Amino acid sequence: MTEPIKAKEPFRFYTRWHLSELLGIKASNLEQLLEHIKGVPGSCIYHHTHRFLQQHQYLSPEPPNDFAYWVREVLGDDELGERLASIDTIQYKTIRSLREKIVETIEKYLKHNPKANLRFAGEDEQFHFIKSVSFIAPTNEAATDLREFAEALRKVTIDSIYFHIFEAHLRLEKGTNDFSNWLDTSLQEKALAEKIAKLDPYTYTLDGLRKTILKIVEKRLAA
Amino acid sequence: MVHINDYIPIVGQSTIDDLKLLAERLKGKVIQHVNSTSVGGGVAEILNRMVPLLGELGVDSRWDLIKGGSQFFDVTKKFHNALHGRPEDITDHDLEIFMETTETNLGLMNTYGDVVFIHDPQPIGLIKKKAGNKWLWRCHIDVSHPHKKVWDFLMSFIPNYDAAVFSSPIFSQRLPIRQYLISPSIDPLSDKNKELPQEVIDAALAKYNIVKDKPIITQISRFDRLKDPSGVIDAYLQVKRYIDCQLILAGGTATDDPEGIQVLAEVQEKAKKDKDIHVLLLPQDDILINALQRASDVIVQKSLKEGFGLTVAEALWKAKPIVASHVGGISLQVKHKFSGLMCHSIEGAAFAIKQLLNNPEYAKKLGENGRQHIKNNFLLTRHLKEYMLLFLSLYHPEDIVYL
């Protein structure tokens, strides 16, 4: 086993916490849902497409977004629920494009199934729009080589994993994740970076994602 | 005394490290909590633990109480019921009584905090003292269908706050100020939730002459109409036709709840025909509550309205199968058929209890899932984190904050 290459720039692990802000906006049927999805802030679309990742870790990979869950469980519309659930979030580099896809999916469905709009949620089961306020801060963990990287990865919270994978990928409109970016540019670990970038993080629990990335890194370390 | 590092075995070192990181950002700020009671009810319970832990993390956090006489608390109890949507005759005289006590407290209380954190409607009028500091109003009540007169009255104060906090999205209203969603929490190390040896559980049953010779169904709640103890008895009687079981209805009263004694008397009257119904007016003894929950086979929370329903989180933390009403914050804690069973009626509650008693493996699985859900989302450490973020948000209006 050779000594791991030292990076010029250390990888500083950040963490991110979020606070849910209630917008006081609600929807009872598909038309209202659609109208508000078009108008709410991007941080609201982000919240409803990413909340499940953190709150229902043990349910993963079942409910990928709140819109799909509400349409299926509350409005009882299985078909549209499935269409919304199967939107491949990882394909969308920006919240804007993800929002457009959600809007297009609902509009298309309503066009072919106008009666779907006649389903109403009960007063206590309306869809409530919420947005995420994100707080980003550096942690005390940093890595200058692959071994230190693996060590820190074991220690940081799932919030930190979340920040470097999801927040970086989508909300901050970076095309890749922070881990792959650093591994590629600072350690010249192109193949390793690609392997991590190829994972579909939306189909893992956050702890499962940590374990998977660790396994890939450990395999490289042992090579 | 419990210390912040005592939570490491439950939530992990990195979670506690995060709390310390956040607390550093609040150095120099004084957080002043204000409510109306130091004992009884979920708010006092949370503050009793949260204030010292915030202090240990390095956040100067203090807690003050407003003063009020019985007339004032009668009015605020009416407010409470009315905000929960119960028909109440709110008179102008009630509002006058409220304002008189508010004026007295405005004269007595020093609102010295950099952040003044007002809990529930009782001290809401203190906002009149707002100077250059930040003010938060924390609503612990289900205000999804509030009584218009009371809500309009509260709205004469709310817009002057910097932000409001609710426990569930369904309580949110269109407000001219920012409003945040923060669920309350339970403390896994408190007397109410910590692990107990079997002999303590047995002793609790023995104390009230309860023999565990048949399944125990339990509702732990204040004696309050909104908790529907009478409906729980009706549901139990429907179950009893098919399954020999017993019912424990246990709870105390809060110092700001004058109606409790009357409700207790009604429940005792209704229960006296059946020797298997145990109505227990408990002293303030959290270990006893913990023991009764752990001794139970099914825990019920059949509230008609609920701010959040911390008793549900307590039961789930003990991996108990639960039957709970689809109201307030309960729906955030229980995912139907996954971490418990939800009901909308007495008949629905009875059916769910029968399902759980007749299928112990299913009941066990629901309880285990429930415990995991509480661990991930409803422990005190998450609550501490969100409160610190809330305080920070008062100084950062943007959606992405770099600390």
Image (cartoon, helix red, strand yellow):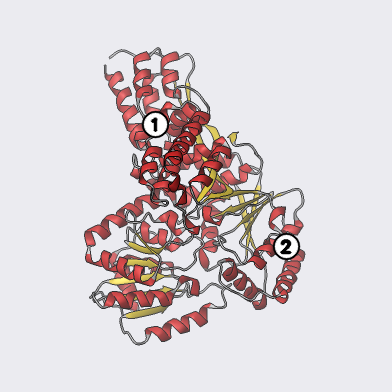
Kindly state the secondary structure of the residue where label 1 is placed. Answer: loop
The residue located at (50%, 58%) in the rendering is: A123
Which residue bears the numbered disc 1? A88
The answer, for residue B291, to whether it is visible in the render is: no
Residue A74 located left or right of residue B237: right
Q: Is the residue at mark 2 from the same chain as the one at mark 1?
A: no
- Whole-percent x, y for residue B335 in the image: 37, 54
Number of numbered discs overlaid on the protein picture = 2
- Whole-percent x, y for residue B239 in the image: 29, 74
CA distance separating discs 2 and 1: 55 Å
| Quadrant for the C terminus of chain B in the image | top right
Amino acid carrying mark 2 in the image: Met
**Nearest to the observer: residue B267 or residue A32:** A32
B355 up-or-down from B25: above or below: below
The residue located at (36%, 18%) in the rendering is: A194
**Nearest to the observer: residue B35 or residue B141:** B141
A52 up-or-down from B89: above or below: above
The residue located at (38%, 34%) in the rendering is: A202
Q: Chain of mark 2?
A: B
**Nearest to the observer: residue B197 or residue B167:** B167
Return the mark for residue B22. none
Q: Chain of mark 1?
A: A
**Nearest to the observer: residue B28 or residue A46:** A46
Which residue bears the numbered disc 2? B109
Q: Can you tell which of label 2 and label 1 is closer to the viewer?
A: 1
B172 up-or-down from B266: above or below: above
- Whole-percent x, y for residue B271 in the image: 38, 83
